[in-house]
Image (tube, rainbow, N blue to C red):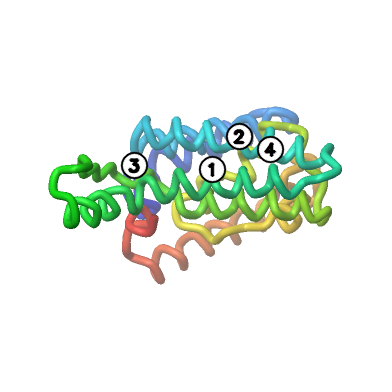
Amino acid sequence: MAFSSVQFLFVFLPLSLAVYWLCPKWLRNAVLAAFSLLFFAWAGLKGAAILVLLAGINWLGGLSLGRLAHKRPLLILLILLDLAVLGGFKYAGFAAETVNALVPGLLPVLSPALPLGLSFYVFTAIGYCADVAAGKVEPEKNPIRFAVFLAFFGHGPSGPIVRYGQQAPQLDPGSETRRVSADRFCYGIKRLVLGLAKRPSSPTSSL
């Protein structure tokens, strides 16, 4: 679902804004997480399942990193796991073709479709785990807040790659940064229109 599509502009975005506005503040992160998951599921259920799996692994990994005295082994494991998922989708076919060029027919050549936004949320998750391990941020204890950080539909499909330390204040639905006003709403619409004008291509093309 491209940001410039009829489905997004006239169905998905108005519906998500309406539900977000009508819900009490304590439910708003859950609303954003649900609509973000729906956004990714629109591009494919398998991709959405991978997103949920990686979000769960990195959230639990962050909690564990916050408790361990020796963090490096777990951090390396988490990074390798994230990169293995990304590499499996992006380079498995190429690797199989390379091996088959030397030993014909040895490996099946698989070319799975790259899930929407995989590169961006993989590197976002790696950055989060690295920051937790370095003591730059505290691990996020709330899985819904972490899901919003990792997969918010506003930046999940095409970036930018965000750092948890920068986003943490905005994850609190009661914070000043999340206060909804007429001026902020109009400013947001203005930025959306300008963004659509500057970037006519589909965000789903940048994975």
Residue labelled with disc 4? 61
Marks 2/4 in contact by CB < 8 Å: the verdict is: yes
Q: Disc 3 to disc 4, how far (Cα)?
A: 36 Å
Residue 182 lies, in percent from the top left, at 66, 52
Closer to the N terminus: mark 4 or mark 1?
4
Characterize the local packing of mark 2: few (<14), some (14-19) or many (20 or more) Cα atoms within 10 angstroms.
some
Asked whether disc 3 touches disc 2, contact meaning CB atoms under 8 Å apart, the reply is no
What is the secondary structure assignment of the residue under circle 3? helix
Q: Indicate the amino acid at tag 3.
A: Gln
Question: In the rendered image, which residue does mark 2 sit on?
Answer: 57
**Residue 49 is drawn in which quadrant?**
top left
Q: Position of residue 26 (x, y in %)?
A: 74, 29
Task: Compare residues 84 and 62 and report the one nearer the observer.
Answer: 84
Disc 1: CA contacts within 10 A as few (<14), some (14-19) or many (>=20): some
> In terms of sequence position, does the residue under pointer 1 or pointer 3 come before the other?
3
Q: Residue at x 63, y 39 (%)?
A: 58
> Which residue in the protein does label 3 denote?
7
Q: Name the front one of labels 1 and 2.
A: 1
Q: Mark 3 and mark 2: span between their CA atoms?
A: 31 Å
Circle 2 SS class: helix
Question: Can you identify the residue that label 1 sits on?
Answer: 81
Residue 75 coordinates in the image, percent (x, y):
68, 47
For discs 1 and 3, the disc positioned in front in the rendered view: 1
> Residue drawn 47% across and 46% down?
84
